[in-house]
Image (spheres, rainbow, N blue to C red):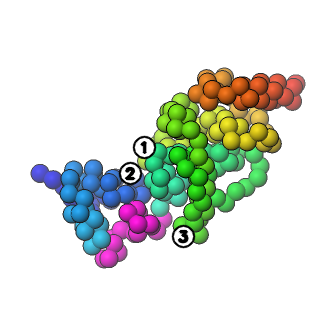
Amino acid sequence: MKKNNLLDLIRAKNTIFTTKDVALIWNETKIAFVRNKLYRYMKTGKIYPVRKGVYAKDKDYDKEELSTRIFTPSYVSFETVLAKAGVIFQFYGEIFIASYLTRELQIEGQKYSFRKIKDDILTNKIGIETDGTYFKASVERAFLDVLYLNKDYYFDNLANINWVKVKDILPIYDNKRMDQLVSKLEEKDKKELN
């Protein structure tokens, strides 16, 4: 028996749903049926429309979760992760996401910056964490993502970087410039600790 009711969505851990997500939750193959039912829920205020084909349980949705549902595959990374970890001190109000394309979007006053990285790197799960609702780079993966896209980048506090983890993740980038830069930054960090 198929379940296709609002309670299934409310019970789910996610705060954000795409039409495809709902079809999977409801085990429904008819996408038109799912769209129509979501439209009715939206019109009666039972779910919140965020963007075409993207819905939230209510207006208090997780913005980072939304950022990874707009374009997939993707994961939260770069300055968003580094600022929270104290590796950089500059506050950015926008959310930075690793993706297969480069775009900037503004949704309900929140800016989302998608940065393109190679598919081989984007789809590699090393250094990617999840809470079951969306993917996010570890501090070390975000650090390497920033180095991958930037030749010169200033990091305020390298003490929060685990260099063993950095070296475990580094081979997925297959980049000699990054290898050299990581060695220099690790050496700089060790000197500052002494």
Q: Left or right of 141: which side holds 125?
A: left
> Which residue is the site of mark 1?
132
26 on left or right of 76 = left
Q: Name the residue furthest bottom.
A: 44
Q: Amino acid at mark 3?
A: Glu
Q: Amino acid at mark 1?
A: Gly
Q: Residue at x 77, y 49 (%)?
A: 89
Q: Residue furthest left?
A: 1
Q: Position of residue 122 (x, y in %)?
A: 53, 38
Residue at x-position 48% and y-position 65%? 60
Residue 65 in view in this figure = no
The mark that comes first in sequence, 2 or 3, is 2
At which x and y percent is residue 81?
A: 64, 45
**Relative to 38, does residue 155 appear above or below in the rendering?**
above
User: Which residues are the magenta region?
Assistant: 41-60
Disc 1 from disc 3: Cα separation? 24 Å
- Binning the other alpha carbons within 10 Å of mark 1 as few (below 14), some (14 to 19) or many (20 upward) gives few
Q: Which mark is on residue 108?
A: 3
For the point 27% across and 54% down, which residue is it?
Answer: 23
Q: Give SS at disc 1.
A: loop
Q: CA distance from mark 2 to mark 1?
A: 8 Å
* Residue 54 seen in this snapshot: yes
Q: Which mark is residue 13?
A: 2
Please tell me which residue is depicted at 38% across the width and 57% down the height of the picture: 17
Which secondary structure lies at badge 2? loop
Depth order, front residue of 132/55:
55
| Place of residue 26 in the rendered image (x, y in percent of width and height, measured from the top left) | 23, 54
Q: Nearer the viewer, mark 1 or mark 3?
A: 3
Pointer 2 or 1: first along the chain: 2
